[in-house]
Image (cartoon, rainbow, N blue to C red):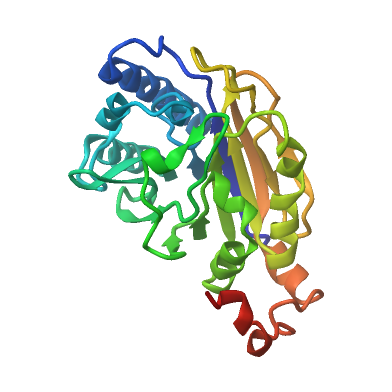
Amino acid sequence: MARIVRGALIQAANCGAPDAPVAKIKQAMIDKHVAMIEEAADKGAQVCCLQELFYGPYFCAEQNTKWYDFVERVPDGPTTKLMMELAKKLKMVLVVPLYEEDITGVYYNTAAVVDSTGEYLGKFRKIHIPHCNPGFWEKFYFRPGNLGYPVFETTIGKVGVYICYDRHFPEGWRALGLNGAEIVFNPSATVAGLSEYLWKLEQPASACANAFFVGAINRPGIEEPWKIGEFYGQSYFCNPRGQIVDEAPRSGDAVLISDLNFDMIREVRNVWQFYRDRRPDSYGNLVEA
């Protein structure tokens, strides 16, 4: 019998004015996402990933210390604990991107992974941090990730995470594949413009090069007051052949559901022997300073 995993991706426009208190914005977005996660569960989803920094706007559009108030500990903070309870109740694996405080003043762009039993399995910290104009001032907010490329053993299979700007770096995709990932989620906040054409190029290419599934998530809408561009949604799943199999709309909230046949991973890898034919002995100069 085929090994079918029903996945869900959630894209959601920011709610609440950006000049509202940070705690109020955060609670409104959490409440909105809880309802959408429950909708995914009602549709039979077994694993669900949220968008990058899901409980607020993409505040990296400016450099303002007020947004440091979004940070919380992982897994000891309230949002991870809430998601652990929700995962257990709904029997769903959850990938939860949030703003993590390690120690006071040391913050990361992080995704917590929670099993369908409610167990916290670990976290991925965004490795590659952009800092460029217009509107992507992430080094003001985040240290580069220092936990490598973990893959988490969940009830639905082996789950990896890469976050937004990471997707431009093929080395991490390969590391996740070599670590055993069967599906990699890439929660993002990316706007129309220079890199939009890459949205449907890089991630399917990485899925094909590594013969695993990819769930790509992007928020929708134009966020006030910064207006750095349109977050163009279009969250999607692609299969190990690099084919997009289900896609959300460009605009508006969406709970995207897709049935993924994990048996395809073995089928594709038995044809395209990219892992067998790698030549790591010839790649040394790639990591020389």
**Is 16 placed left or right of 215 in the picture?**
left
| Residue 32 appears anywhere in the view | yes
* Residue at x 68% of width, y 60% of height: 2
In the picture shown, does residue 157 fall above or below 115? below
40, 11: nearer the viewer: 11
Q: Position of residue 85 (x, y in %)?
A: 28, 39
In the picture shown, does residue 282 fall above or below 203? below
| Residue 92 appears anywhere in the view | no
**Is 285 placed left or right of 146 in the picture?**
right
* Residue at x 51% of width, y 48% of height: 163
**Is 171 placed left or right of 69 in the picture?**
right
Q: Position of residue 149 (x, y in %)?
A: 47, 64
In the picture shown, does residue 275 fall above or below 124? below
Q: Position of residue 72 (x, y in %)?
A: 24, 38
Q: Position of residue 99 (x, y in %)?
A: 34, 39
36, 73: nearer the viewer: 73
User: In which quadrant of the rendered image does the N terminus lie?
Assistant: bottom right
* Residue at x 30% of width, y 53% of height: 119
* Residue at x 63% of width, y 59% of height: 3
259, 112: nearer the viewer: 112
215, 116: nearer the viewer: 215
**Is 259 placed left or right of 164 in the picture?**
right
The answer to which image quadrant residue 256 occupies is top right
